[in-house]
Image (cartoon, rainbow, N blue to C red):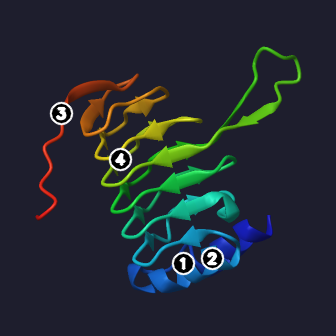
C-alpha cells in the first residue's frame, strides 16, 4: 500500500523528462532496472521487487504490470500503452481459489503493442511482436508476429538490427 501511495503522489503525474526520478523510486522499492530503461508516469507497477528491466526496455503510459509473480523484460523491448502483464491467477479447481503466481519473461527486441494481454507463466521469446489487443496465454516461437484472441502466428518477423 505504501508503494501505491508513493507512486501516486510522487511519480504518476510526472512528465517524461523525469524518468530518472521514476527509476529511482522503483529501484528504492526493490525493482532491478538497467541503464537506459524507461518507465512512464502512467505505468502501474504492482510490486517493484518482482520487476526486472534490462537495458533499453520501456513500459509505456497505461501499462498494468500486475507482477504478483516475477516479470523480466529483455533488452530493447517495448510494452506499449495500456498493455497488461498479469503474473498471477487463481486455482479455480479448489473452493478457496488460492492465488497462483507465475513469472512472465519477455525476451530481447520484443514489441508488445497497445492493449495486449500477457498471461501468467508466459515467455515471449526474442524478437516477437504481439499485436494490439492480442491475448497470449501459451507458448510462442521467436521472431514471429502474433495477433488475435487467442494470439496466433501471423508471419515471421524480419528484423534489421542495424537500423
> Which residue in the protein does label 3 denote?
156
Up/down of 86 relative to 100, above or below: below
Q: Nearer the viewer, mark 1 or mark 4?
A: 1
The quadrant in which residue 89 appears is top right
> Which residue in the protein does label 4 denote?
114
Proximity of marks 2 and 1: CB atoms separated by less than 8 Å = yes
| Crowd class of label 2 (few under 14; some 14 to 19; many from 20; radius 10 Å) | some
Q: Quadrant of the C terminus?
A: bottom left
Residue for point 24% across, 35% down:
145
104 left or right, relative to 56: right
In space, the residues marked 2 and 1 are separated at their CA atoms by 6 Å
Proximity of marks 3 and 4: CB atoms separated by less than 8 Å = no
Earlier in the chain: of badge 1 and badge 3, it is: 1
Q: Nearer the viewer, mark 3 or mark 4?
A: 3
Instruction: Classify mark 4: helix, strand or loop.
Output: loop
Residue for point 40% across, 79% down:
16
Proximity of marks 1 and 3: CB atoms separated by less than 8 Å = no
In space, the residues marked 2 and 4 are separated at their CA atoms by 26 Å
| Closer to us: 3 or 142 | 142
Q: Nearer the viewer, mark 2 or mark 4?
A: 2
The quadrant in which residue 101 appears is top right
> Which residue in the protein does label 2 denote?
27
Instruction: Classify mark 3: helix, strand or loop.
Output: strand
Earlier in the chain: of badge 3 and badge 4, it is: 4
> Which residue in the protein does label 1 denote?
23
Up/down of 44 relative to 56, above or below: above
In space, the residues marked 1 and 4 are separated at their CA atoms by 22 Å
Up/down of 75 relative to 115, above or below: below
Q: Position of residue 32 (x, y in %)?
A: 59, 69
Amino acid at each position: 500500500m505504501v508503494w501505491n501511495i508513493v507512486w501516486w503522489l510522487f511519480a504518476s503525474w510526472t512528465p517524461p523528462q523525469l524518468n530518472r526520478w521514476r527509476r529511482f523510486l522503483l529501484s528504492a522499492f526493490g525493482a532491478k532496472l538497467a541503464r537506459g530503461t524507461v518507465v512512464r508516469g502512467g505505468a502501474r507497477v504492482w510490486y517493484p521487487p518482482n520487476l526486472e528491466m534490462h537495458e533499453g526496455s520501456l513500459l509505456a503510459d497505461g501499462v498494468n504490470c500486475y507482477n504478483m509473480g516475477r516479470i523480466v523484460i529483455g533488452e530493447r523491448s517495448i510494452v506499449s500503452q495500456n498493455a497488461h502483464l498479469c503474473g498471477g491467477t487463481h486455482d479455480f479447481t479448489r473452493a478457496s481459489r488460492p492465488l497462483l503466481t507465475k513469472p512472465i519473461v519477455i525476451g530481447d527486441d520484443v514489441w508488445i503493442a497497445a492493449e495486449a494481454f500477457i498471461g501468467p507463466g508466459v515467455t515471449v521469446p526474442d524478437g516477437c511482436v504481439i499485436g494490439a489487443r492480442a491475448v497470449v496465454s501459451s507458448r510462442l516461437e521467436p521472431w514471429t508476429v502474433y495477433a488475435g484472441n487467442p494470439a496466433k502466428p501471423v508471419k515471421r518477423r524480419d528484423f534489421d538490427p542495424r537500423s
